[in-house]
Image (spheres, rainbow, N blue to C red):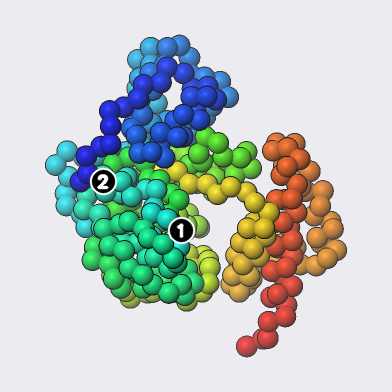
Amino acid sequence: MQKRPSSPRPFQHAKAKDLAEIESLLKQGHPIHMALQGPFPTGIRASELLPLLDSFSSSDPQFDRCVQTHLPPQARENPEPLSVTAIIPTHRQTPIGLDALRNQDCDVEVLVLLNGGGNAEGDRVERVAWEGHGKTRQRGVEMAQGDYVLFTVDDALPRGSGCIRALVEALEEGEYDAVFGRQIPWPSTDPITKRRLRHWTPPGQEHRRMERLDHVFALYRRETLLKHPLPEVPIGEDLHWRQGRRIGYVPNAPVIHAHPRMARQLFRRTRDLHVQHHALGEQPLVPSAIALALAIPSIVEPLFRAGPQELPNQIAELLGQWRAAKMTRRQPTP
């Protein structure tokens, strides 16, 4: 277990300038304490701000006790030993969550699968050829040494030194085949992504069954993946693997993660993921050029929320869905 990087930085408010500084300090690995005098600031969701903090206090003791449930899970005293291997494929960088994974209250081996040029840091760094999300991650499972396997990504930042233990405990208590944690946006994340993350991974305290699985922050028993390996698909391996299995969602195991919305990347990712949805028998959302034209009015409402700069992104996602349907129609019937 690594020593924490520095003493907490106190914040008296939660205005835009403070939020930007909190984001910067998080990315540098600094713990953060917030002390508020007076009411909680308007326009800010406590369920999204508080998991970014390491501690919180206010002038209202009753409110102070209430918000403690939103803080990230901290280390247990004298915890039961756990052995986990965190598998992180990357072609870009040392994972930003490396210190957070090392600071857990359990034994975490960080296995970085480096599939590009340059160098990356981790407890183990293995150079591997990129063979798609499914096959590449499964190679990491075969290399792993822990009893549990945590799949995450290089731009995700786990919050709380007890967040992996929360995943393990939920996995065993719920008798799930796999579990995944809550994704929280960065303070600077765009409104569209924030809204979607609230829908996909809502706040809460108790783990529960969910018809989703996301490898941004997902935990399995290693023996499960050795018996039932990930499918060898280029993307959407979590989408395929979850079919017919018991998946648990753990909202009190938070990770900060959000991609900038850029039209070209959105088109490609939407196209590729929807191809996988169609392969599972799901009907296309935009099956034809006529459907594409009819869907154009649906992008107006998000523009009011995010501004006109969001227009290329909305169009890119619609085009990705349409292109996926077109590609699926051209595939030969087995």
Instruction: State the SS at label 1.
Output: loop
Q: Which mark is residue 104?
A: 2
**Image-quadrant location for residue 304:** top right
Question: Which residue does the numbered mark 1 point to in the structure image?
Answer: 92
Q: Residue at x 76, y 40 (%)?
A: 308
Structural distance between the alpha carbons of marks 1 and 2: 24 Å
**Mark in the foreground, 1 or 2:** 1
Amino acid at circle 1:
Arg
Which quadrant is the C terminus positioned in? bottom right
Q: Residue furthest front?
A: 118
Q: How many marks?
A: 2
Amino acid at circle 2:
Gln
Relative vertical location of residue 10 with respect to residue 238 in this rendering, above or below: above
The image shows residue 11 at horizontal and vertical percentages of 41, 21
**Is residue 49 rendered to the left or right of residue 306?**
left
Do the residues bearing badges 1 and 2 touch, measured as CB atoms within 8 Å? Answer: no
The image shows residue 63 at horizontal and vertical percentages of 40, 19
The image shows residue 142 at horizontal and vertical percentages of 30, 73
Instruction: State the SS at label 2.
Output: loop
Label 1 neighbour load within 10 Å: few <14, some 14-19, many 20+: some
Q: Earlier in the sequence, mark 1 or mark 2?
A: 1
Q: Residue furthest left?
A: 78
Q: Residue at x 68, y 82 (%)?
A: 331
The image shows residue 241 at horizontal and vertical percentages of 46, 69
Q: Residue at x 61, y 61 (%)?
A: 269
**Image-quadrant location for residue 332:** bottom right
Relative vertical location of residue 241 with respect to residue 98 in this rendering, above or below: below
Q: Which mark is residue 173?
A: none
**Is residue 91 rendered to the left or right of residue 145?**
right
**Image-quadrant location for residue 190:** top right
